[in-house]
Amino acid sequence: MSQITQYFKDSYEELVTKVTWPTWRELQGSSVLVFVASIIIAAVVFIMDWVFGVNSDDSIWSGLVGLIYKLF
């Protein structure tokens, strides 16, 4: 049991004294970067779905692939 207690004491000591935590400014910058990257990735996936006609059964646009199928 003393090994477990020592482990938690050492872990706490390391988190308090040895870990460098980001400043509030760095944390905000990273959060904005993650948010913008998520929006860009979602937009790219949306555009790909729209162009290729994913879930086109319930819409007028059947996508680029559907258009090619209709031509042949």
Image: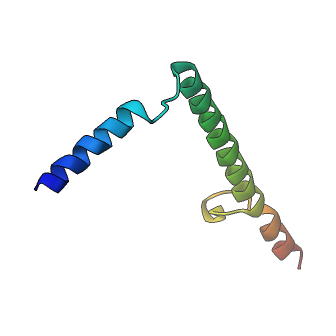
Q: In this view, does 18 lie above or below 49?
A: above
Name the residue located 23 percent from the left edge and 45 percent from the top edge.
8
Percent of width and height locating residue 31: 56, 31
Above or below — where is 33 with respect to 38?
above
Q: Quadrant location of the C terminus?
A: bottom right
Q: Which is nearer the eye, 31 or 43?
A: 31
Question: Which residue reaches farthest bottom?
Answer: 72
Please name whichever residue, 6 or 35, is drawn nearer the observer in this view of the structure.
Answer: 6
On the picture, is 39 further left or further right than 28? Answer: right
Q: Which of 33 and 13 is in front in this view?
A: 13
**The N terminus lies in quadrant:** bottom left
> At x 29% / y 43%, what residue is drawn?
10
Q: Which image quadrant for residue 59?
A: bottom right
x%, y% of residue 41? 68, 47
Question: Where 6 falls versus 72 (above or below)?
Answer: above
Judge left or right: residue 35 versus residue 46. Answer: left
Asked if residue 60 can be seen in this view, the reply is: no
Residue 60: image location, x then y, percent:
71, 57
